[in-house]
Image (cartoon, coloured by chain):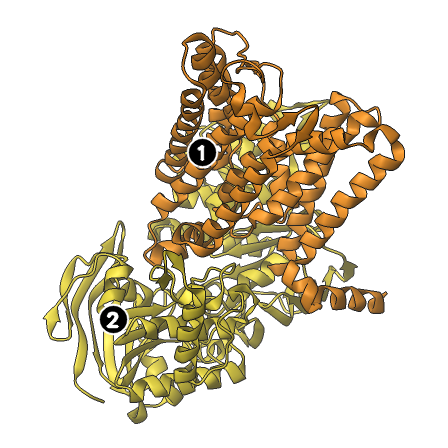
Amino acid sequence: MGEVILTMKGIDKSFPGVHALDHVDLEVRKGEVHALMGENGAGKSTLMKVLTGIYTKDSGTITYEGREVEFHNPKEAQDAGIVIVHQELNMMNHLTVAQNIFIGREFMKGGLIDDGKMNDEARKLFSQLGIDINPAEKMGNLTVGKQQMCEIAKAISHEAKVIIFDEPSAALTEAEIEELFKIIRDLRAKQLGIVYISHRMDEIKVITDRVTVMRDGGYVGTLITADCTKNDIINMMVGRVIYEDPKTHSMVKPGAPVVLKVEHLNAGKMVKDVSFELHKGEILGFSGLMGAGRTETARALFGADPKESGDIWINGQKVEIHSPQDAVKCGIGYLSEDRKRYGIVVGKTIAENSTMASLKDFLKGLFIDKKKENEATQKYIDRLKTKTPSVDQLVVNLSGGNQQKVVVAKWLVRNCDILIFDEPTRGIDVGAKSEIYHLMNELAAEGKSIIMISSEMTEILRMSDRIVVMCEGRKTAEIDIAEATQEKIMHAATLR
Amino acid sequence: MQKQLNEKRGFANNPIVKAIGLQRIVVVLAVILEAVLFSILSPAFRQYATVVSILDYSYYITFMAIGVTFCLISGGNDLSVGTGMICYALAGGYLVQHMGWPVWGGMLVTIAIGLCFGVLNGAMVAIMNLPPFIATLCTMLITRGLGSILTGGMAVSWPSRNSAGGWFRSLFKIINNGKIIPVGFAIVIVSIILMSIVLNKTRVGRYIIAIGSNKEAARLSGVNVVKYQMLAYIISGFFAGLAGIAYSATFSSSVAPGTGAGLELDAIGGAIIGGTSMTGGQGSIIGTLLGVFVMSLLKTGLPYVGLQANWQQIITGIVLIVAIYIDVLKNKKTA
């Protein structure tokens, strides 16, 4: 490790209602690979966005190459030599590799673009990196791994001094990761400072020199990787002791029948051979890190995305679910993590939203039976304790928690017995949160079965009777609540 | 079945086929097929005058289509070229017919107004962030109304061939002792070559492709996306003006206000048949020219087999649906 090239000190950043970064420190030296770790929402990406000028910090200082700096956009950071290799690649698939690398600074000859020279220069870059990519190939034809190599080549061609890798290995194969590590080691030998964001504990041990851990927007500490164990890091990531009365044992009655059985479900890259059972009256928590494939599993099960293979049984009967319509017919309701986009129509009334999934039952001839609709809506307003002056209130005027209740009502009106809650309390304040929890417990006690996808560890431990942990599209653990600990879950979620 | 499929892929991977592009080969075959079909069905189709007629239609459609191709590649669209073209020709022609302007002055005005509407479309899409489809649908209406207002609802006659100022008609067609030489095709070819170079070999083209492929990536790479997105519509406006001139020069009838709606679909259809993608980032000017010939052959040939205007519209609609569906399938495969 060489001298310090980048220091972020006391970085503070708030968004309305969220204290995203709370006096965070980070120091990167030349010739080191510095891991940045933390749970989902710990603030890693926010910190990097502040560094590269996508967000402006509220307070704190950034010192780069001995001078205090503040970048206003990624271009400025890039020109200064700080480059991000994004997890979601920023590539123009219709242009060639070389055209992508040199976009915005093309070589010209006689007023026209000199593609030949660009190809030559790209080839030089690749041979420097020791990788074999044809610069004239269309970017869209490359594998994700190769595209990532191109992004790295682009970063290097900008004479980068600090390169930030944002979960670079998430979409790579084993062999591609080996190649990536080789390149990272070369860059380290060339005295670049490297920030490496990843959830994979094993990689951290292999490739990084130091590790900085963040938690809930705050700075926890920095360790020399070689001196610490995997468990040290996990403990730092989890750290907190605020279990809000977690369940100590399953509330499911012994011998409760299996209402839903999923076997060998495969759908795209994110759902690989997932099998599980859901019992009557059970809350089955789905835990895992961002991109673990939980939502994708739910969507495939619900018929919202096509599945390649897999069998589904409901109440012991095999069913074919090819569309959300099929799923609803089978009694499955899906409460999306993105309520406003997929869950409710905010510009419509509570009554209109409540009966949306079962309008057929509210028709009198060709027309909607408004009286019947209002009665049913009122019934669920009362039952779910939705706070509203009337059934004709526009949903847009309700709070997040009450909007969530309207979505629940929609599926209850439809007589759904299996409810999939995807991040049920995202964007909901603390008070409404406990109401939603209470509601879910009540539903389960009544014999409804619930799949709850949640990225919040406390929520998983508080609500679930049983926990399925996923990592990279696969189920990596199934833990009864009586035996569940944060450490166990985190371990399975970072397993590879 | 599998073997058949493999053979098909083998054909697509043949280096010669790859160099020319499978789609282009298919389009050329389609043009030939159309010509053969019409020739068999109607003996009257088999004459030189038909070729001239096909070319006459191809000029203004090609010009519109070149512009539309740039808009499509940028990830947008330009629906205003059809009525726009007529509007600009009306304005220019009115100055020549009623205000005593020289023909070249009228031509310049035609192109200038086209450029103005290009700037307007570009500003709405790139600066105001209106959806291109809606923005240019509105300018389609505006140009249609404006054309009528400018001429007081009257049709406009550009000078006829033998009158003073009729020289401009010879830009596209020379008639000498009853012999017709379709010189307009040379202008088309020059435009195609020039705009191919602009698309593939200049920053303008490169950035328009980049924007259509991934606008955010282009922006983060330091590309001035507002400027280059606007440029696509300005190019389209310019070529719509040129199309207005070509239209006025090749058809002896007067230019009527209120017309032109639907002509943009010939251009968009040509571009898409030629391999330009509705989703942006992808397209070629030469492909567009080939696609235009599919459309202009239809326009010329259908009357020969007894299918008049109404049928032409139905068939154009169907051809467009097929072309767009192929584009959708193509994108699905790459995604």
Residue pointed to by mark 2: A81
Q: Quickly name the residue at label 1.
A: B238
Amino acid on which disc 2 is placed: Gly
Same chain under badges 2 and 1? The reply is no
Name the residue located 65 percent from the left edge and 54 percent from the top edge: B330
| Alpha carbon distance from label 2 to label 1 | 41 Å
Task: Output the chain of dot 1.
Answer: B
Q: What secondary structure is found at the residue carrying circle 1?
A: helix
- Between A265 and A103, the one nearer to me in the picture: A103
The residue lying at 73 percent from left, 35 percent from top is: B297
Residue B323, x across and y down, in percent: 68, 43
Q: Which chain is orange?
A: B
Q: Residues within 10 Å of mark 2 (few under 14, many from 20)?
A: some
Palette colour of chain A: yellow
Residue at (71%, 26%) from the top-left corner? B313
Instruction: Looking at the picture, tell me which residue is in the foreground, A332 or A38.
Output: A38
Q: Nearer the viewer, residue A218 or A143?
A: A143
> Mark 2 falls within which chain?
A
The mark found on residue B318 in the picture is none
Q: Vertical placement of A220 versus A383: above or below?
A: below
